[in-house]
Image: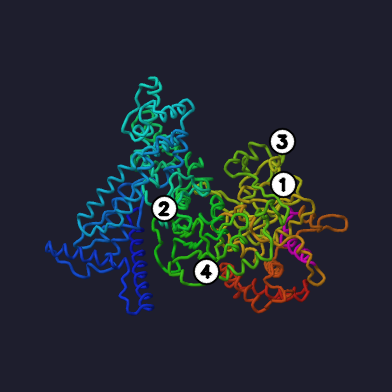
Amino acid sequence: MGSGHFLVSLVDRLTNHALDAIAEARALVKARFPDLDYESPVAEEVRKVRATIRGNAQDAGWAVSEEQLDDPQLVKRMVLKRCVYGADKNPRAVELAKVALWLHTFTVGAPLSFIDHHLAAGDSLFGLWVRDAIDKAGKGGQLFLHEPLSNAQRQAVVMRTIETLTDAEVAEAHRSAEMWKDVEAQTGALDGFVSFMHALDWLDLPKPEKALVPLWLDGRFGDPIAIARGRLAPEGGKARADEVERFTAIWRAARELIDEERFLNWQITFPGVWDNWSSAPDSEGRQDGGFDAIVGNPPWDRFEFEEVPWFEARDKTIALAPSGAKRKAAIKALKDADSSLWTDYQKALGRMAMATRVAKGKLIYCRLNNGKLNLYKLFVERAHSLVKPGGMVGLLTPSGIASDLSASEFFRKVATGGHLKALYDFENRRTRHGLDPFFPDVDSRFKFAAMIASPSRTFPAAQCGFFLQSVAELKNPEQAFPITAADFARVNPNTGTAPIFRTRRDMALTTAIYDRCPVLVDRSGAEPEAAWPVKYWQMINMTSDSHLFRTRTELEGKEGAWPVGGNRWQSAAGEWVPLYEGKMVQAFDHRAASVVVNPENLNRPAQPLQATPEQSADPNWLADPQFWVAASVCEATARLPWVLGFKEITAPTNVRTFIAAGFPAYGFGNKVPILTPTEPNVRLELLLANFNAMPFDFAVRQKVQGQTLNWFIVEQLPVIPPAAYGRQFGPKTAAEIVKAAVLELTYTAHDMAPFAQDMGHVDDAGGVLPPFIWDEDRRLKLRAKLDALYFILYGLFDPADPAHDPAQARDDIRYIYSTFPIVERQETERWGRYRSRDLCLSWINALAAGQPDAEVDG
């Protein structure tokens, strides 16, 4: 509930719907029966409430104006009493929400509405279905729980009676309160028992102690229900003294958990919302009945113990320690001093461990509890289990709910099953509008989403918008548009996660690409289907494998090594090869930057030093890595002539998003993943060209939510399959065109001689020919030629298609180039125009005319 903002807004929203329905009903009846004086049941109730309040005011001498008793204000009171529910673990939040709702619906002359029956203080995430607790109790549970269960279920009728009371006068408000007290009394026995059973889940008792639970359920320690509620302590008589003592320890720990964690057993807390409590939950964890809708903004915190905020509320000197090591030392000092704060700290750690074990244990959560836990994901799953099958859930969460691999199984079912009603993805920064962030205390680069979905209802399409910076942008049909379930499945067949189409045109172009091309690895069927037979590697972890690294100084000193050329070193222990990092790489360029270390930069001491034009033009110059590793640890690249790798860290707003290069077969940090062939005769130079092509990069930008090109994203990218490279363009195939361009773009230094040999770039005697001269102008033209070829292969410009519209296709290509604004700005500043775009359009004409060797100027 927080401070009640969502509930206050919801009261207004439902009130407006109710007033619209009253007016619509009146108009419909009037149109069909002009002479009938129709009054809807709600309007009749409003009229009676108004008369009651006015009469009481006159009797008491209060001044009440008609404006204070208008229809909207009185309907608000009815909506508040009957329709709106809320839950929060913090009792203060419940009281704040209650006050906010009272102030918002206050009516002069009427008492404050009784709303305790719909506002609960408890942990929304933890608590059991009644059926689960009965099953845990075993065969005898159904018998001794019969009366508590019957008493609790009967309170649904009482709840409906409370909801019909208008609280128009003090007597009604008092009657509501008295009836609610009786509801609490009648449900207390069952609620206490269910909470006690859940506390035992948290305690995770060892086998000897777990054996005492059946004794308690059999009444060996006294009345099981009274003990569970804390009304009776375990006692002897039918049990041995040691058993009583051991179970009493369990009982105290369980009761402490119940009091402090405030488990919320939803069926018992809101008895009018669910139907048959004894039935088992369905496969989605839902019971019969449920809420019509759940809305909210759940916490976005990680589900883990965080030392700094915990100590900040208790001992700021520890929280503000300058480093983690010093904070650990200060915490250890608490232990040495036998401080009560140490005891509390250990207790808090233990509670978090208990909660984590329960959350991961499939008892309550089974779809969004994998990987690192996050509170918002648990709230999403919980909400979907609490609504009716046809109900709706609308929550504000980080955008990861639609893009993270850990949430993909859940989101896939929702999106590809047609259960998604809307997904609105927002940037916290609002630079387009010159506005402050939505959430000033959250990083401006953070993205969040409003996700509206149903467990069972289906919709023809989901209304979606991405990278929005204002709610007003939802009205722009180019920024908010429908995406069908089939489109979700087509664009991300493996995970069903959401693409990030910024505009309707982005969606149309991207889905058209996916219609024509396979993804790199399709896992949607019974067996994976790979368009290219490759294996993904993250060779060397830059953190956990750092003991393998050697600097130049360490090679010369500790290892006694000497340079042998090609950035390699030799020592008595063996050969040492460069360790490539992402900062060293650009497209078709494995030596784009050296790594320099600034020890004064504590956060990022290793920085790239870009190669100068003179260095790039020197085929003998090689970029200096930060580290070298033993060749013996480079198992993935052993016996390969060269390696295809790409930069994992990127962003959809960078100059380019997917950056790949050919490398010598050396060592690679985990931020430069590599692909190696799993079959003979796989021509990876074709895939290398594909990865660096403009239409491919455009598709990539529709898939990257954050800053990491995870493998699950790469697998689902659309690629040109090997067979498609047999297409003829005049005298040459697509493969021949690509091969020649990639060879010239990649082979600019002597350390790539094995690559050149693999490409057949040798003289008559079999010797490798010299590297190509580095020429920026020539490289720009070659890349434009490759882009033109891939626009044709991707079907974005295809004269062979009977429906082909050359003018529209050229306009689409111009649009795709416009989505790379940094490239456009850089080229315009240098040449006065978007040169690579213009060259590409010229090359498209030449290739379409069957002239792959034409001279294209520009």
Residue 225 in the image: above or below residue 614: above
Front-most of residues 547 and 552: 547
Q: Earlier in the sequence, mark 3 or mark 1?
A: 3
Whether label 2 touches label 1, CB < 8 Å: no
Q: Earlier in the sequence, mark 2 or mark 1?
A: 2
Front-most of residues 6 and 630: 6
The magenta segment is 733-752
> The residue under label 1 is which amino acid type?
Thr
Whether label 4 touches label 3, CB < 8 Å: no
* Residue 138 appears left or right of 848: left
Task: Tell me the mark number nearer the camera, choosing from 4 and 3.
Answer: 4
- Residue receiving disc 3: 572
Marker disc for residue 481: 4
- Rounded to the nearest whole Å, what is the CA distance between mark 4 and mark 3? 65 Å
Task: Report the residue at 64% width, 68% height from top.
Answer: 512
- Residue receiving disc 2: 298
Residue 416: percent from left, percent from top: 57, 59
Task: Report the residue at 52% width, 69% height from top.
Answer: 481
| Residue 736 included in the magenta stretch of the image | yes
